[in-house]
Image (cartoon, rainbow, N blue to C red):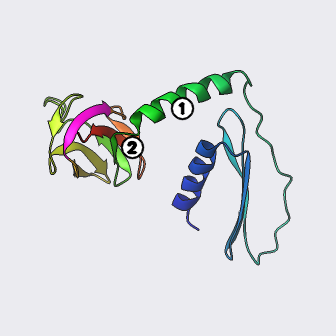
Amino acid sequence: MDLKEIQSLIKFVAKSGASEVKLETDEVKITIRTGKAGKETIVHQIPMGASQPQMPMPTVEPASAPAAPATGGKETAPAEDDSKYITVKSPIIGTFYRRPSPDKPTFVEVGDTIKEGDVLCIIEAMKLFNEIESEVSGKIVKVLVDDSSPVEFDQPLFLVDPS
């Protein structure tokens, strides 16, 4: 299991709301604990077959109990509204740019109608600027990432209304 898979697992566990997940394969044994505040920790990763002493498992304390339900309620409502939209996700890890250069206008704005093949943004990865083209036609409803910010693989970038 590589680092990218472990990071994806941590994010999935944090979003799922589970407090603890244990994963054991032929290669590794991983335990992930999350607090109610959304903080996560890999408690241990031990290559199977290796004889390493086990360390005591640290726990993550929630920051404040009242803050978690309020945030959870806000996250639920937009998710229901967004279900009718298509999410355009990042195909690579890199830096997200909404415009081809600082002095040029953005590729797309909220409310713009796009068609398949239109350039939506650029993601810079290792000094290469990759144009991200739309795979759907529709109307841009929301831009989910700020300009010049880092993005992960499969991170939502835009919401598109296909109707």
Count neighbours of disc 2 (C-alpha within 10 A) and say few if under 14, some if 14 to 19, many if 20 or more: some
Report the magenta residues as a range. 137-142
Question: Is 82 contained in the magenta span?
Answer: no
Query: Who is closer to the viewer here, 58 or 145?
Result: 145
Residue drawn where x is 54% and y is 61% of the image: 5
Q: Which residue is mark 1?
A: 76
Q: With respect to residue 28, does 63 lie above or below? A: above
Quarter assignment of residue 92: bottom left
Mark 1 vs mark 2: give the one in front: 1
Count neighbours of disc 1 (C-alpha within 10 A) and say few if under 14, some if 14 to 19, many if 20 or more: few
Residue 105 image position (x, y, % from top left): 14, 29
Q: Tag 2's secondary structure?
A: strand
Residue drawn where x is 16% and y is 35% of the image: 113
Q: Tag 1's secondary structure?
A: helix
Query: Who is closer to the viewer here, 126 or 119?
Result: 119
Dot 2 amino acid type: Pro
Residue 117 image position (x, y, % from top left): 15, 51
Residue drawn where x is 32% and y is 38% of the image: 159
Question: Does residue 75 appear to the left or right of 31 in the view shown?
Answer: left
Dot 1 amino acid type: Thr
Q: Which residue is mark 2?
A: 156
Question: Does residue 148 appear to the left or right of 70 in the view shown?
Answer: left
